Amino acid sequence: MFLLSDMAKEKILVTKVEPTVADLFIENCKSEGKTVNKKLGELIEKENSKAEKTFLAGKNKIIYQNTLNSFKWYAELDNGEKIELLNNLSSDFLENLKLQIEKAQRDRNDWLSLKEKGSVEIPNFKGDKNE
């Protein structure tokens, strides 16, 4: 449980923990020469700094490298950055990949019961099973 309170430039977080957990944390703070508030603030900052974007926006690009008779697969991000995914891909590899993608899409469409061309998945807000 936590309580969030707005202050001028700071927010106050309050939480409940078992007494033994609180005692251990307080002792740890003392041994580090820090107040409980200081240590909690550091832990929150550290946790927040771990947050990274899970997804980036961009497009897949595959180009043929005629001097190598192979293909290069990269992502071109919306910010202009290019990230190489795989290089020196054979035509056979791409053909197999295409077949696997098509199969996975068919499996997904079967799972979602997409039967009509142009249909899209719609969240089932009621949790009902229609089939």
Image (spheres, rainbow, N blue to C red):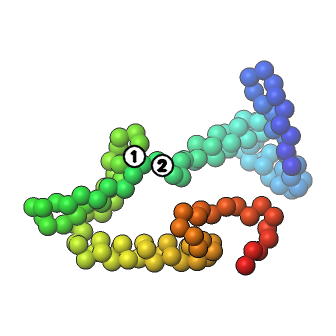
Would you say 113 lies left or right of 97 here?
right
In this orientation, does residue 27 appear? yes
- Amino acid type at circle 1 is Leu
Residue found at x 43% / y 74%? 102
Looking at this view, name the residue that lies furthest to the front: 116
Question: 41 above or below 96?
Answer: above
Q: Identify which amino acid the numbered label 2 is placed on.
A: Leu
The answer to which quarter of the image holds residue 95 is bottom left
Q: Quadrant of the C terminus?
A: bottom right
Mark sitting earlier along the chain (1/2): 2
Residue position for label 1: 77
The structure residue drawn at horizontal position 90% and vertical position 53%, both measured from the top left corner, is: 19
Tell me: residue 24, above or below residue 7: below
Observer-nearest of 69 and 13: 69
Q: Secondary structure at mark 1?
A: strand
Give the camera-side residue of 31 and 119: 119
Q: Which quarter of the figure has residue 2? A: top right
How far apart are the alpha carbons under marks 1 and 2?
7 Å
**Looking at the image, which residue is at 46% across and 78% down?**
103
Image x and y of residue 10, in percent: 75, 27
Q: Is residue 33 visible?
A: no
The picture places residue 65, in percent across and down from the top left corner, at 16, 60
For residue 56, the mark is: 2
* Residue farthest top in this picture: 8
Q: Locate residue 15 relative to residue 116 in the image: left or right.
A: right
